[in-house]
Structure formats: structure tokens, C-alpha cells
Amino acid sequence: MLQQFPEIYKVKCLQHSSGATGHCCAHQSPGDVTLIVVPDLRNANAIHPLEPKVSKDVLVRAADYLQQHCSFFTTVYVENPRYEKVLLECKVRFTTQGANGYYKKKLNEELVQFLSPWAFDSSLDITFGGAVRKSVLLNFIDERPYVDFVTDCHMYHVVNGQRSGDLGEIFVSDPRAILVSGSQHTISDFTLQDVCT
């Protein structure tokens, strides 16, 4: 597959999977194989760099090519990964007051890069699965030189557009999935009013 299609960087093979939508464990299908493919990020002009996808044309050609090399009793499906997002919501007091808008934007960009580093550095590997702890993100924010302190932090797991409640740790829910950062985290200013309430 990788030799035949240079547009594809990585492949994950799911045995006995029909390629049907939804969670793969609910669609066991003996004899069928689903290949989850990740594009080569070095060659891509990705429309959405946090959720890179192989074009529909390549998916169809790859499935046709592999089907020619399989048993008559096997059906091959080729799909893009599913992306599950991490969203953070917190209040931050910045060390320099008066430039909060700039620092909110900077912190959001650094969080996105921390959670999805491969989207910014093509030498880094994109991996299936994944997990993230809220405590790790809190520590990351607290270490920023422009952050005085962070409080009221909530972390959410977004799967198929559905947001979870506040979580301390997130694991991917589907073997077809890659855990990525949401593009926009909610960062609010910490004020004295927050202390009073």
C-alpha cells in the first residue's frame, strides 16, 4: 500500500471490520478488512491540518488495488481516520495586564501545538489512539512565562460533535481514531470578581 500510493504515510489494519460507520466493535464482519490511512503530511496542503485526510479518489483507488490482491472471500475497505478532539476551558491571569487578547491567542496556539505537534512539524509522527491528562495541560499552561496562574479548568472530549462532561483524563473511544486538539480553546480572564463569587 505505502509503495503503491506515496500520498499515504501510515496505515492501520483492522481485521474483521466492515468499514461501516460508527464504532468498529459494533460492526464485526469476519473476512472483511478495513485499512485506516493517514496522508503524508510533508506533501500535503491540508485544508484542515489538525484533521488531515486522504482524498476520496486515493481511497477508492487504494481499495480497488488491494481488492485485486486479496482472496475472493475478502472485502477491503479504505478509510480516513476519525478525529476525536480535546477542548480546554479555563480562566487565566496573565503576568502583563493590558495585552490579554494577545496572550489568549498565543496560549491557544501553544495549546494546539502541544496537543497536535505533528501538525506543525512534519518530522514528528502522527499516532493512532492517544490519551491526555488534565493535570499535564494545567502544568503546561502554568509553565508559560506570560501566565501568572490558571484556575477553573475543564477538559472535554468531543466525539462525532458530542461533547463530554468535564474529564480528568481522555482516551480515544475508537481504534480508528486519532486524538487531536480542538482549534479553539476557551480561555477567559481571571478577575477579582471571580474571587468574590
Image: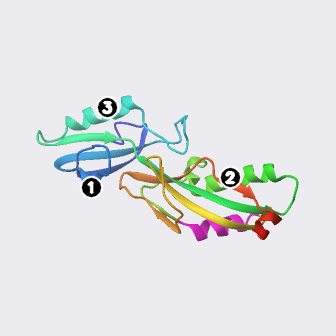
Quadrant placement of the N terminus: top left
Taking the image as shown, residue 42 lies to the left or right of residue 175, namely right
Q: Is residue 158 above or below residue 48?
A: below
- Residue 167, horizontal then vertical, whole percent: 52, 65
As helix, strand or loop, the secondary structure at mark 1 comes to: helix
The residue singled out by tag 1 in the image is: 25
Q: Residue 56 carries which label?
A: none
In front here: 92 or 46?
92
Q: What's the coloring here?
A: rainbow
What is the distance, in whole Å, between disc 3 and disc 2 at their CAs? 37 Å
In front here: 88 or 117?
88
Region rendered in magenta = 133-144
Mark 2: amino acid: Asn
Q: Disc 3 or 1, which lies upstream in sequence? A: 1
As helix, strand or loop, the secondary structure at mark 2 comes to: helix
Mark 1: amino acid: Cys
**CA neighbours of label 1 inside 10 A, class few (<14), some (14 to 19), many (20+):** few
Quadrant placement of the C terminus: bottom right
**CA neighbours of label 2 inside 10 A, class few (<14), some (14 to 19), many (20+):** some
- Residue 13, horizontal then vertical, whole percent: 30, 51
The residue singled out by tag 3 in the image is: 60
